[in-house]
Amino acid sequence: MALTDTAIRNAKPKDKPYKVADSGGLYLLINPRGSKLWRIKYRMHGVERKLALGAYPEITLAEARTARDAARRQLAHAVDPNTAKRQARVEASMRAANSFAAVAEDLIAKREKERDAARQLMASRNRVAALQGSAGTAKTSTVLTTIARAAEERGLEVTALAPTAAAAQLLGEALDTRADTLARHLLAPGKPTTAERLWIVDEASLVSARDMAKLVTLAESHRARLLLVGDTAQLGSVEAGAAFAQLQAAGMETAHLTQILRQTNEAAKAAVEASLAGDANAALAALDSGGGQVIEANTRGERFARIASDYASLDVKERRKALVIEPSREGRDALTRQIRHELAERGQLTGPAITATRLVAKDMTRAEAKDARSYDIGDTVRFAKDYADKGIGKTEAYRVTGIDAGKAAVKLAAQDGREIDWRLKQWGASHAQAFRAEEIELRAGDRLQITRNDRALARVNGHQGEIIAVDPEQGRAALRLANGRTAMLDLANPRDQHIAHGYVATAFAAQGRTAEHAFIHADSAATNLVDQKAFYVALSRAREATHLYTDDRVRLTSAIRERSGQKQMAVDHAPAADAKPVASHDAATRSAKAIAASGTGLQ
């Protein structure tokens, strides 16, 4: 059935991208975040391909059909529509040619740095290459979209990867391609084929040395080119190793982006540039001059009260575009309580309150996960994969009822009453996560965040929504997500207990996010939490203005100057001053394996 404008307008986003067909291969791709993209599906030399036309309503239904008819005429004369489209664009360029470089030249000719980075990476013959870009340099919307489009036109299968599900989904939508978390991809990369592939990994600085070695080895066996994207100046992996920085130091071919585009306020941009240069004093001066403000207060309570008041004074739409950053988890919880109190006082949280249980990850290391002493009676355990022979399902939750440290065994109780003898060193510990229970109060108007991926329920760790109603008697709450979908939470069900208030983020959780306004708490005495990297990450989040709250700006700038935030590595992999880019596929692979195996733990 042919599409109509009414049908297009009525097509609402769902949990996953879906297609609405017109005719003759023309269809509309509806993404979870609401974008509606025209595509034409066709076959050339027996290979299915796609032609991107643009977004609705910028491209009308009539215009899309006209483009489809033109593409069909080209096919009738054995002309590939994608090739014709590319040639039409690059003919006006001095470097007209059917190549990656020509595509980049045409698509981003007005941005010299982005063009140079795209051309370098597209022309690279290395299996592993990197795009090093400062925060807010529009790495995804410029270089990566160009590379992904050109790769697909050459017949490469493109996969978008990131350490978190939320980041992977955003990258996949931006590139209009398949997306997955890095952890899931490492577990199930698919079968090797003769077809060439391109794996684009965002936030690569968050990838541990161990996972980086696995990824590079998989890329080698799956004939995949690997493009690592990130910023070594931002926060790194919480696990051992700083693989992205070390690979660059070892000579991995790297393109660079330095022109910051995120900030719409020049003073705010100057603050980010100063923080990147390591000049905290100049960064705060830029905030004073129009990039935001610096507020000093002696006690944490006074600072939290001011942050809560300033945040609550925003209207509902402004709060959705704001980001509050507190470095510590304990401080995050305390500031959340202050913000909720202020919102309630202003009538922004309404109706009855419900006190429920939420599950908080215990964040064990691999070694701790195999040690029965790491578990407590009453903990909840969830598995990332099924163990059918053990009676374990990945969608189920299990309660710890017994612990035998000597046998490295934990007794689990299933929801149906079954008992399971879990031998930690024999199976499952590497693919399990333990949680402790905490109380959480919810009211209508509360900002809530999902804290665990659940594909079956279409929930993504890090995604947020708003509580629109609670039913204390039934123990239920209605959560309206950012895509407009409403999820009903049964707060007695462990699957619905992976939640947290979404008002405050740590600097680590804030990395990769963008806001209009940022409210940052920075205590100069927080020696392990406020350093150069965290300061840069926090200041680079806001487009318009950053509001920084501290006890003493002089002591803060001095403390940041003394704390680089760099991990001290057990082995120094820095190359000689004249080190050259890695010159072969195998060399990059060997470098990654060597870095992972060299004892890159923290000293």
Image (cartoon, rainbow, N blue to C red):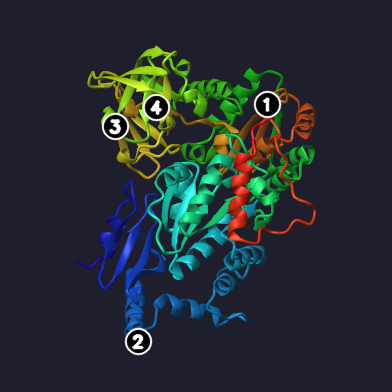
Q: Amino acid at mark 4?
A: Gln
Q: Secondary structure at mark 3?
A: loop
- Marks 4/1 in contact by CB < 8 Å: the verdict is no
- Mark 3 crowd level (few <14, some 14–19, many ≥20, 10 Å Cα): some
Residue positioned most to the left: 1
Q: Look at mark 3 in the image and give the residue it sits on.
A: 393
Closer to the N terminus: mark 3 or mark 1?
3
Query: Does 601 sit above or below residue 156?
Result: above
**Nearer the camera: disc 4 or disc 1:** 4
Please tell me which residue is depicted at 50% across the width and 29% down the height of the picture.
Answer: 366
Q: Look at mark 4 in the image and give the residue it sits on.
A: 426
220 horizontally vs 468: left or right? right
Q: Secondary structure at mark 1?
A: loop
Q: Look at mark 1 in the image and give the residue it sits on.
A: 528
Q: Amino acid at mark 1?
A: Asn
- Mark 4 crowd level (few <14, some 14–19, many ≥20, 10 Å Cα): few
Q: Secondary structure at mark 4?
A: loop
C-alpha separation, residue under disc 3 versus residue under disc 4: 17 Å
Q: Which mark is residue 77?
A: 2
C-alpha separation, residue under disc 4 versus residue under disc 1: 36 Å
**Nearer the camera: disc 2 or disc 4:** 4
Query: Does 18 sit above or below residue 153?
Result: above
Closer to the N terminus: mark 4 or mark 1?
4
Q: Position of residue 27 (x, y in %)?
A: 31, 65
Residue positioned most to the bottom: 77
Q: Quadrant of the C terminus?
A: top right
Closer to the N terminus: mark 2 or mark 4?
2
Q: Which quadrant of the view contains residue 238?
A: top right
